[in-house]
Each structure stands twice: as C-alpha cells, then as structure tokens.
Image: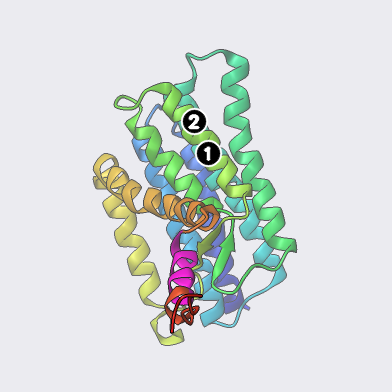
Amino acid sequence: MITKSIPSLFTVANLFLGIVAIILVFPDNAKPEIAAMMVIIAMLMDGVDGRVARALNAQSEFGKELDSLSDVISFGVAPAFIMYSVAFQELNAAVAWIITALFPICGALRLARFNVISGMPGYFIGLPIPAAGGVLATLALFHNEIVIPVLMASTLVLSFLMVSTIKYPNFKKLGIPRNAVWVVPIIVAVAVVLGILFPHHLSKIIFIPLVLYALYGLKKNVDRRLPFSGRKRKRRKEALLNEEPIPSEHSA
C-alpha cells in the first residue's frame, strides 16, 4: 500500500510547490525568482512521479487525475501569476486579466484533451503544460530586459501552442529502473538546494533548454507547412534522381 502511494507523494509535492510559487508573488512576499524556481522544481517532481509509478508498477487512474489537477495549478496558474505580478500589473486591467487567465485556461484544455484523446507514440500533441509553464515562469525573470508587448505576445503564443496540434517529442517514456528508485529523493534534494541557493541564475539558465523545446515544435510545424521543406524536399530530390529521362523528339 505504501509503495503504491509513493508516486502520488511526488505529485502532491508538485502541487505544494505550485501553491508556494503563487504565495511568493503576493505583494507582501514579492520573490519572483524563488517562485520561478518552485515551478522548475515542480517540473522535476512532475517528471519523476510517472517514472516512479512505472518503476514500481503503481500506475492508477487516481494518480493520472491527481497529476492533471496539480499541473493546472503548478504550471498553469502559478506561472501566469508570476508573469502578471512582475510585468502586467501596470497594464489596462481588462487586458492584463484576460491574457493572464488565458494561459491556465489553455493549459486546462490541453490537459483535458490529453486525458481523453490518445496521442501519437513518442509524441505529445500540443506543447505540454509543464514546459509551457516553465518557459513562462522563467521568461518573467527577464521583465527588465524584455519590453512588455513581447512578454504579452509570448504568453499568448505559449497559450496557443498548448492547444495546438503541433507534435512535441515525449521523453516521459524514459523510465527509471526499479533498483534505482532510491536515487530519486537524492536528485530532488540536490535540485531543491541548488534552487534555493541560486534561484535567479539557475532559473535563467533553465529557461534556455525550455524555450528551445517550445520553439522546436513550432519550427517543425512551419517546416511541414512549407511547400518544399524538410522531408518534402528530400522526397522531391529522390523522385528526381530516380526519374527516368524522357526521350526527346529529336533524339536518335
């Protein structure tokens, strides 16, 4: 019974960190760097819970639903609040509220679709909400370097990517051997310590691979829609090479 509950403990930790991130952007606290780091550590928890469940053979519908509910808070509401607190408060209230609310709404829609529609093997359909939330939370830390319209547009683009049909690589199938599960708490503890000691710099460093992942799917979608790009160009080249020359009327 205890073994079956271990994955859910990681999911609850994910939810707890999301709530803490929201608290940390209240005016009385105002620690967006630490709040963003809480979202990043929650991403680690989210990545671990499923792998631990598979390693312990403890997967369940309860765990799946709990994971989705936690993700809405940790990677939908919390990152949107972080961005709102550092960048959108000076905007027109209606505009700021709509853009802020749109992000977790799209995240919830994406999770609902994920739960009821079978995806493609090895791929997610739409940008996963943990990745989108991680990008938004860390992007908010650049509010002094990036103009507000760009931050607004980025929030809207991330919202769209979550509910889009763009394919993103799925790394969740990379499992953890059962005899290596004991390493997971050590990795989590190290991540928490590093996050507390270096919240500002570490969050900005983690932003780079997250935004590259988000842009990867966007690039693949653009390539697919161009008339002679990627595989289409390759197939056309192969067809031309394999095509037999047509005799001219004046030949022979």
Quadrant in the picture for the C terminus: bottom left
Q: Position of residue 134 (x, y in %)?
A: 44, 47
| CB-based contact (under 8 Å), mark 2 and mark 1 | yes
Q: Which residue is mark 2?
A: 153
Q: Residue furthest right?
A: 116
Q: Nearer the viewer, residue 195 or 129?
A: 129
From which residue to which does the magenta span run?
229-239
Magenta part, dominant SS: helix
| Neighbour tally class for label 2: few under 14, some 14-19, many 20 plus, Cα within 10 Å | few
Q: Which residue is mark 1?
A: 157
Q: Residue at point 56% right, 75% down?
A: 53
| Residue type at the position of mark 1 | Val
Checking the image for residue 20, the label placed there is none
Which image quadrant is residue 37 in? Answer: top left
| Residue type at the position of mark 2 | Ala
Q: Residue at point 44% right, 80% down?
A: 251
Q: Is residue 174 visible?
A: no
Q: Position of residue 76 (x, y in %)?
A: 57, 43
